[in-house]
Image (cartoon, rainbow, N blue to C red):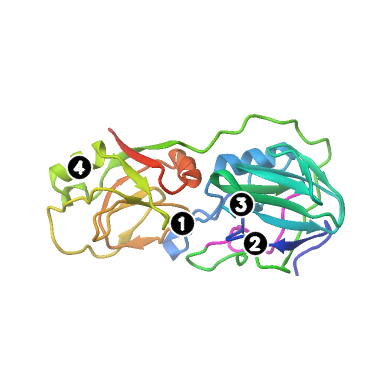
């Protein structure tokens, strides 16, 4: 049974999509299990650092509309990632810095003012039951805690000793997303003109993007070969091109196999901006050797 020694967090308003995330569960792709984990990993690590938590402590990832929660004990929290208005029992408190939330008070994270995904961390972290070494929700496989619903409760961990760290600058949401791209393994499936289009045209973030992949709107990439591949392994950052010809950048909840050709791969270190790019944001791909 999951421990509740640190108290409970009650969900008052779950928002459009709020999930528990940590550093994810890498290393299970050979069993068909994806990585999951916080999409904006630097923001999640920073929120935890401000509270003295381990970098991979579990926290909440909100999507666009924020959420509201009520702890049954006094807790220190940080809201970071996408900018938003934050209140405790209706009174404004700091965004991006540790705030004290009394027992029974409602911590409300408002809609995103810039960016897409907010991170709500608590001193001691969240402690739902881990699955394969991680507390992250994987929306594709269904592993980990389900997305939050009104009335849910989550166990809080015991906070570390020592005062929280002070405020620090947070990066803003990108006005243009420039993604470095290593071509392959299936770039030869596309016409040379298509590869020029990929690296010179401006795409835009589609509103149909999600934790599985950042979908783009823009010119279609013309294939040099017909047909489909047998399913092959997919990695984080793979840029898959479905039949409509518009590139899709695979994010943390991506499938571990797929049959559409992968024209290139975006390095993991460049994907944090994709987590915060709102629909309509310009996207450019820059080929790296």
Q: Residues within 10 Å of mark 4 (few under 14, many from 20)?
A: some
The span picked out in magenta is 123-138
Of the residues under marks 3 and 2, which one precedes in the sequence? 3
Disc 2 + disc 1, Cβ < 8 Å: no
Say left or right for 275 vs 85.
Answer: left
Q: Is residue 84 left or right of residue 29?
A: right
Q: Residues within 10 Å of mark 2 (few under 14, many from 20)?
A: some
Q: Which residue is label 1 attached to?
A: 210
Q: Nearer the viewer, mark 3 or mark 1?
A: 1
From the viewer's perspective, tell me whether residue 171 is left or right of residue 197.
right
Secondary element at image label 2: loop
Q: Earlier in the sequence, mark 3 or mark 1?
A: 3
Q: Nearer the viewer, mark 1 or mark 4?
A: 1
Q: CA distance from mark 2 to mark 1?
A: 23 Å
Q: Which residue is mark 4?
A: 195
Q: Earlier in the sequence, mark 2 or mark 4?
A: 2
């Amino acid at each position: 049974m999951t421990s509740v020694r640190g108290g409970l967090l009650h969900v008052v308003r779950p928002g459009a999509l709020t999930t528990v995330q940590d550093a994810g569960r890498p290393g299970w792709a050979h069993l068909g299990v994806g990585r999951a984990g916080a999409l904006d990993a630097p923001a999640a690590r920073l929120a935890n650092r401000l509270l003295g938590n381990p970098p991979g402590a579990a926290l909440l990832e909100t999507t666009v509309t924020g959420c509201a929660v009520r702890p049954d004990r006094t807790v220190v929290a940080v809201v970071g990632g996408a900018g938003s208005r934050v209140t405790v029992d209706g009174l404004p408190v700091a965004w991006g810095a540790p705030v004290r939330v009394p027992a029974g008070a409602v911590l409300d994270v408002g809609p995103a003012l810039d960016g897409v995904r907010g991170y709500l961390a608590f001193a001691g972290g969240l402690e739902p039951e881990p699955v394969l070494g991680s507390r992250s929700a994987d929306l594709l496989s269904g592993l980990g805690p389900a997305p939050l619903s009104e009335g849910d409760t989550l166990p809080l961990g015991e906070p570390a000793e020592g005062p929280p760290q002070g405020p620090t600058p947070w990066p803003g949401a990108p006005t243009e997303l420039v993604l470095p791209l290593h071509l392959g393994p299936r770039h030869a499936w596309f016409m040379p003109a298509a590869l020029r289009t990929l690296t010179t045209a401006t795409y835009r973030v589609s509103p149909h993007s999600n934790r599985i992949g950042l979908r783009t709107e823009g010119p279609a990439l013309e294939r040099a070969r017909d047909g489909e591949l047998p399913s092959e392994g997919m990695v984080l950052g793979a840029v898959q091109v479905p039949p409509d010809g518009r590139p899709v950048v695979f994010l943390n909840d991506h499938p571990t196999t797929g049959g559409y050709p992968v024209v290139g791969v975006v390095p993991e270190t460049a994907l944090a901006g994709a987590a915060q790019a709102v629909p309509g944001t310009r996207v450019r791909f820059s080929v790296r050797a």
